[in-house]
Image (cartoon, grey):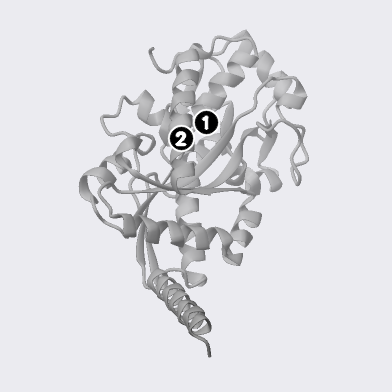
Amino acid sequence: MSQYRKGLWRSALAAAAVAGFVTSAAAQMELKIMAPAAPGGGWDQTARSMQQALTQSGIAKSAQVTNVPGAGGSIGIAQLVNNSKGDGNQLMVMGYVMVGALLTNKSPITLEQTTPIARLTTEYEAIVVPANSPIKNAKELAEAIKADPAKVTWAGGSAGGVDHIAAALFAKAAGADPTKINYIPFSGGGEALAAILGGKVTAGISGYGEFESQVKAGKLRLIGLTSATKTPNVDVPSIKEQGVDLEIANWRAVVAPPGISADQKKALTDAMDKLAQSKEWQEILKTKGWENAYVSGDAFAKILAEEQARTKDVLTAVGLVKS
């Protein structure tokens, strides 16, 4: 064998050894995933779906989920930044909700203090009413809110989050004052769902996945999704198609604590890259109705910075944040 071929052979063996080491290192990871909300909501569902896919696929040895509810994730992110610095096995689920909530709550802890890892999914908002509600469609809801925005009560996630923003933008599109809406924030999807099913509010707003089973069971009426056009598997025109100019999407992602090393960041990013490509995760996306919106590393960090600037502009425009 020539020296050249021997060199190529050694390089190939070295590359295979490195690849094997990376795979085994990822498989040995004992991950901790924080859902900074109560059980039952979108962040909790995302964390537990990650746990299932990571362990079933063998990407991680284990994945433990903890819930730290309150203030749109403000309590959870404070715990991540203050208590988990340098912990390369810790992840926190977050998303558009947290971007707005931190601004609205004037949180002293910011997303700039975390280590961005990856955006996982995107999902359109759904507006629902109890099955016995006199409101049948988006036009009727728009008329009700235009007549008296305070009389229409909304149940959704934390103040300043995507649900709150969507409700304010719906009111604005309906010709009502978005600063006058009567929005009731809940820290967990389960509590909000109970309020809607119990007829304690006029309408509910959240990701479609959180309402789908109750809509299909006939307990909730779907008014529409906040997509540009009707989406597959949802037999209702979009809010926009019904004449109310509202289009907004939620997204969910994971960040790590501050102070982790470059190697720790790479290990977490590699694990998320493998998660996104796994058949277990693809099956979960299909089951939950989540759209794959995977972006990792510096590209995600850039998107996160852009979303913070855009969200501040929207919240200021609808009166939820003072300029």
User: Mark 2 sits on what residue?
Assistant: 97
Badge 1: how crowded within 10 Å, few (<14), some, or many (20+)?
many
| Residue 66, position as x, y percentages in the image | 35, 55
- Left or right: where 241 falls relative to 307: right
Give the position of the C terminus as an image quadrant: top left
| Residue 151, position as x, y percentages in the image | 55, 15
| Residue 175, position as x, y percentages in the image | 63, 9
Q: Nearer the viewer, residue 224 or 152?
A: 224
Marks 2/1: CA distance? 8 Å
Q: Is residue 184 above or below residue 273?
A: above
Contact check, label 2 and label 1, Cβ < 8 Å:
yes
Q: Is residue 47 above or below residue 29?
A: above
**Residue drawn at 21 percent across, 44 percent down:** 82
Element type where label 2 sits in the image: helix
**Residue drawn at 59 percent across, 28 percent down:** 203
Element type where label 1 sits in the image: helix
**Residue drawn at 30 percent across, 48 percent down:** 257
Q: Is residue 297 above or below residue 172?
A: below
Single out the residue that lies furthest toward the bottom.
1
User: Mark 1 sits on what residue?
Assistant: 163
- Left or right: where 127 falls relative to 57: right
Q: Quadrant of residue 79?
A: top left
Q: Earlier in the sequence, mark 2 or mark 1?
A: 2
Dot 2 amino acid type = Val
| Residue 201, position as x, y percentages in the image | 54, 28
Badge 2: how crowded within 10 Å, few (<14), some, or many (20+)?
many
Dot 1 amino acid type = Asp
The answer to whether residue 138 shows anywhere in this view is yes
Image depth: mark 2 or mark 1 in front: 2
- Left or right: where 275 falls relative to 82: right
